[in-house]
Amino acid sequence: MSQYEHTCMIRGDGGRTIRTILDRICDKWTLLVVATLDQQRLRFTDLHRQIPGISQRMLTLTLRNLERDGLVSRTAYAEVPPRVEYELTPTGRSLIPPALALAGWAIEHIADIEASRTAYETRTG
């Protein structure tokens, strides 16, 4: 029995919880936000500048979801103008090693994947 099957049996939810968490972690922006916050606390505008292509609205939604899930903490300072900073929580920091492993796997296998895609398109195109 796989670890996934074992966890699903224990939880009794058919894998719904795991899929929900993986959906969050594997969305288009989450890993980029987490990687950008690795080793540094950033203000919203600095974070926005460092992630090319993300809209302010999508960054806001991503940060809210990460805060809700306990991966990012938000600290608001009573200053004029207001200052808000984001940083990874210990749980968020624990995501860095598996994320780096996944990125390393992608880098290691990109040539094989691209070759398979080309072969597939040739066969089916």
Image: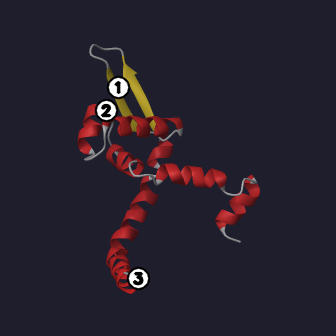
Is 52 on the left-hand or right-hand side of 17?
Answer: left
Q: Which residue is mark 1?
A: 84
- Image position, residue 70 (x, y; %): 52, 38
Name which residue type carries label 2: Phe
Quarter-wise, where is residue 122 in the image? Answer: bottom left
- CB within 8 Å, label 1 to label 2: yes
Name which residue type carries label 1: Val
Identify the secondary structure beneath mark 1: strand
- Image position, residue 117 (x, y; %): 37, 78
Real-space Cα distance between discs 1 and 3? 51 Å
Going 61% across and 54% down the picture, which residue do you hit?
18
Question: What is the crowding at mark 2: few (fewer than 14 residues within 10 Å), some, or many (at least 20)?
Answer: some
Q: Earlier in the sequence, mark 1 or mark 3?
A: 1
Identify the secondary structure beneath mark 2: helix
Relative vertical location of residue 84 with respect to residue 60 in this rendering, above or below: above
- Image position, residue 53 (x, y; %): 27, 47
Check residue 17 in the rendering and tell me which mark sits there, or answer none: none
Check residue 124 in the rendering and tell me which mark sits there, or answer none: 3
Identify the secondary structure beneath mark 3: helix
Quarter-wise, where is residue 112 in the image? Answer: bottom left
Real-space Cα distance between discs 1 and 2? 7 Å
How many marks overall?
3
| Residue that sits furthest to the front in the current view | 125
Return the residue nearer the eye: 115 or 46: 115
Going 69% across and 59% down the picture, which residue do you hit?
7
Q: Which residue is mark 2?
A: 44
Return the residue nearer the eye: 1 or 63: 63
